[in-house]
């Protein structure tokens, strides 16, 4: 069975600082994708960054980067130069091709402090 | 390009009533999924449709049903509403047909906030 685990229910960070959100997963698929989604108070889920398991290079999107450790099945999100607009729930997710659904973690509520 | 549109944004219903929620996916997307989001249970999968066929259904009672039309628009229906059905219902659409290992990015709507009183 495919699982995604986020062990940090809440985190806070000072504006301009760096924060890392953790995610571990388990899957039986050979190739797979991992995603980080952001859900601000407006409720719209927005894709932050994606990582393909076969790519060894960690994905980067501006201030957002991942640390993908395939052997350890770890997929953490690093936010650099945190901004007030980064305040949101962050979900780690992986599509399960066999069941046509996304497996989501329980989310980490991030608050950026001024 | 228009995003995923969910209507209505907010609903207040009474126990025992039924409700229909609508989702219009991004043009060209044929896969539509529904999720229920609550503070206690997180995001729970309801069902997924592709080309008008339900390919998977989550662990929800039969009061929850859905369908997809030929234009890929989808509706979900909840009958005999219970207080516990109060939640944010999210719809997501994607382009890929869930080929193993595919880049199946989901695009989400803003959700429908259902309150059952």
Image: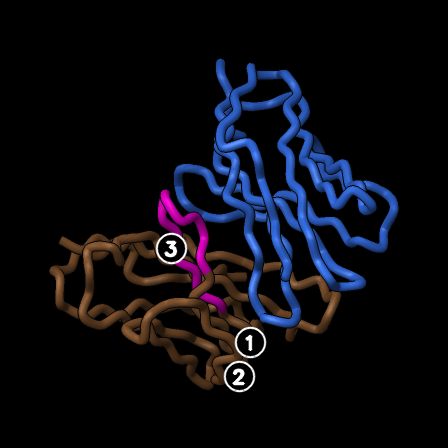
What separation in Å lies between label 2 and label 3 (alpha carbons)? Answer: 22 Å
Chain letter of the blue region: A
Q: Which labelled disc corresponds to residue B30?
A: 1
Chain letter of the brown region: B
Range drawn in magenta: B33-44
- Give percent across and percent down for residue B70: 46, 86
In the shown orientation, is residue A57 left or right of residue A47? right
Given residues A113 and B101, the one toward you in this image is: B101
Q: Is residue A80 above or below residue A7?
A: above
Q: Given the image, what chain letter belongs to the residue carrying mark 1?
A: B
Q: Is residue B37 magenta?
A: yes
Q: Which labelled disc corresponds to residue B51?
A: 2
Tell me the residue at 80%/41% (across/down): A69
Dot 3, crowdedness within 10 Å: few (<14), some or many (≥20)?
many
The quarter of the displayed image where residue B104 is located: bottom right
Tell me the residue at 58%/70% (across/down): A100
Q: Is residue B32 above or below residue A50?
A: below
Q: Which labelled disc corresponds to residue B111?
A: 3
Q: Say whether marks 2 and 1 touch (CB < 8 Å).
A: yes
Q: Is residue A1 above or below residue A38?
A: below
């Amino acid at each position: 069975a495919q699982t995604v685990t986020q062990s940090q229910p809440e985190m806070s960070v000072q504006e301009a600082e760096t924060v890392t959100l953790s995610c571990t997963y388990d899957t039986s698929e050979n190739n797979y994708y991992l995603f980080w989604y952001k859900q601000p108070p407006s409720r719209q889920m927005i894709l932050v960054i994606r990582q393909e398991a076969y790519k060894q290079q960690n994905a980067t999107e501006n201030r957002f980067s991942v640390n993908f450790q395939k052997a350890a099945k770890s997929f953490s999100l690093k936010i650099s130069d945190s901004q007030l607009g980064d305040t949101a729930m962050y979900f780690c997710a992986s599509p399960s091709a066999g069941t046509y659904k996304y497996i989501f973690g329980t989310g980490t509520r991030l608050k950026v402090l001024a | 390009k228009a995003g995923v549109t969910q209507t209505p944004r907010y609903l207040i219903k009474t126990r025992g009533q039924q409700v229909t929620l609508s989702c219009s996916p991004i043009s060209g997307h044929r896969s539509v999924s529904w999720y229920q989001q609550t503070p206690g249970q997180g995001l729970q999968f309801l069902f997924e449709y592709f080309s008008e066929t339900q390919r998977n259904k989550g662990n929800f009672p039969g009061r929850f049903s859905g369908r997809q039309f030929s234009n890929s628009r989808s509706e979900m229906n909840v009958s005999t509403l219970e207080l516990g059905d109060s939640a944010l219902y999210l719809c997501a659409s994607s382009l890929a047909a869930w080929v193993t290992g595919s880049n199946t990015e989901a695009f989400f709507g803003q959700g429908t906030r259902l309150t059952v009183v």
